[in-house]
């Protein structure tokens, strides 16, 4: 069955972003007068929960059980996350987080072979725009036939909702596509949607459980290995 579309996760897959997120959370905490600090070890644990707002609530519930929550807790979290997003998109627009090795070439090769591209991510839409405007240029949206991100689905990864949303936009069946992910949560999400999935790991996800993945790679610096494993037509150079 020829592959008709490749669906990309964003954080950890298109770019190694999570330390940028982590630093932006810490800047937001400091700006908001909170003495919270997420170091790498703690953030590694907090990444169990996808979605920045959900991750803040997880931190409060499971790591600050005695905290007296602000009266309008949801607004508090939403506003704190908006401050974090401002810091994070500033980092992206400053070009501090490049695309991972091989990603731009893969996107271009796929387009040349008329394979459609899509995004399925838990992250905030502004983050996707800022990352890809820098990584792909002002016309980045023209690369993608579907851009599923953030709060558009009720349940974030590892739930399959975002992948079902993308498949619906593409009007494709799961078996027509492959997905590229970086984390166990992401893999569980795409597999639950019935999509053959490849993983490229990073320092946060290297030791996670990738059972069910069609292949696990350190990165895509050698695209020919990936093309062979994925059954993608090698580009006509
Ligand atoms: C990764 C996530 C996101 C980011 C933080 O998304 O779980 O929540 O960690 O971004 P994915 P936000 O791997 O699905 O791209 O703060 O905008 O949620
Ligand atoms: Mg990811």
Image: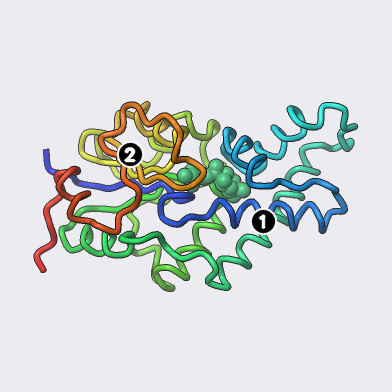
Q: Which mark is residue 155?
A: none
The residue where tag 1 is placed is 23
Rendering coords of residue 57 (x, y %)? 72, 35
Q: Secondary structure at mark 1?
A: helix
Q: Secondary structure at mark 2?
A: helix
The structure residue drawn at horizontal position 69% and vertical position 47%, both measured from the top left corner, is 39
Whether tag 2 and tag 1 are in contact, CB under 8 A, the answer is: no
What's the colour scheme? rainbow
Q: Residues within 10 Å of mark 2 (few under 14, many from 20)?
A: many
Of residues 221 and 107, the one nearer the viewer is 221
Mark closer to the observer (2, 1): 1
The structure residue drawn at horizontal position 68% and vertical position 61%, both measured from the top left corner, is 86
Q: Which mark is residue 167?
A: 2
Rendering coords of residue 110 (x, y %)? 22, 57
Lateral position of residue 109 relative to residue 170, left or right: left
Would you place residue 188 above or below residue 145 in this image?
above
Q: Is mark 1 within 8 Å of ligand 1?
A: no
Disc 2 from disc 1: Cα separation: 33 Å
Rendering coords of residue 167 (x, y %)? 33, 39
Total marks placed: 2
Q: Residues within 10 Å of mark 1 (few under 14, many from 20)?
A: some
Q: Is mark 2 within 8 Å of ligand 1?
A: no
Would you place residue 188 above or below residue 198 in this image?
above
Q: Earlier in the sequence, mark 2 or mark 1?
A: 1
Say which quadrant the N terminus sits in. Answer: top left
Of residues 101 and 196, the one nearer the viewer is 101
The structure residue drawn at horizontal position 55% and vertical position 32%, both measured from the top left corner, is 154
Rendering coords of residue 160 (x, y %)? 43, 30
Of residues 233 and 176, the one nearer the viewer is 233
Q: Quadrant of residue 23?
A: bottom right
Say which quadrant the C terminus sits in. Answer: bottom left
């Amino acid at each position: 069955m020829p592959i008709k579309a490749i669906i990309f996760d964003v954080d950890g897959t298109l770019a190694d972003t999570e330390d940028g997120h982590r630093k932006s959370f810490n800047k937001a905490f400091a700006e908001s007068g909170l003495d919270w600090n997420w170091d790498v070890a703690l953030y590694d644990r907090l990444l169990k929960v996808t979605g920045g707002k959900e991750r803040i609530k997880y931190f409060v519930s499971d790591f600050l059980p005695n905290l007296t929550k602000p009266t309008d807790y949801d607004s508090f979290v939403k506003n704190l996350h908006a401050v974090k997003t401002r810091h994070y998109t500033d980092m992206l627009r400053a070009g501090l987080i490049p695309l991972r090795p091989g990603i731009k070439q893969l996107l271009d090769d796929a387009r040349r072979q008329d394979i459609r591209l899509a995004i399925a991510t838990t992250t905030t839409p502004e983050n996707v725009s800022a990352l890809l405007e820098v990584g792909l240029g002002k016309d980045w949206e023209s690369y993608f036939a579907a851009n599923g991100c953030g709060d558009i689905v009720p349940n974030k990864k590892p739930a399959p909702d975002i992948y079902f949303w993308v498949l619906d936009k593409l009007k494709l069946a799961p078996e027509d596509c492959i997905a590229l992910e970086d984390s166990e949560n992401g893999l569980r999400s795409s597999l639950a949607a019935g999509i053959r999935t490849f993983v490229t790991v990073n320092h946060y996800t290297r030791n996670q459980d990738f059972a069910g993945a069609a292949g696990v790679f350190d990165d895509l610096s050698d695209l020919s290995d990936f093309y062979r494993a994925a059954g993608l037509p090698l580009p006509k150079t």
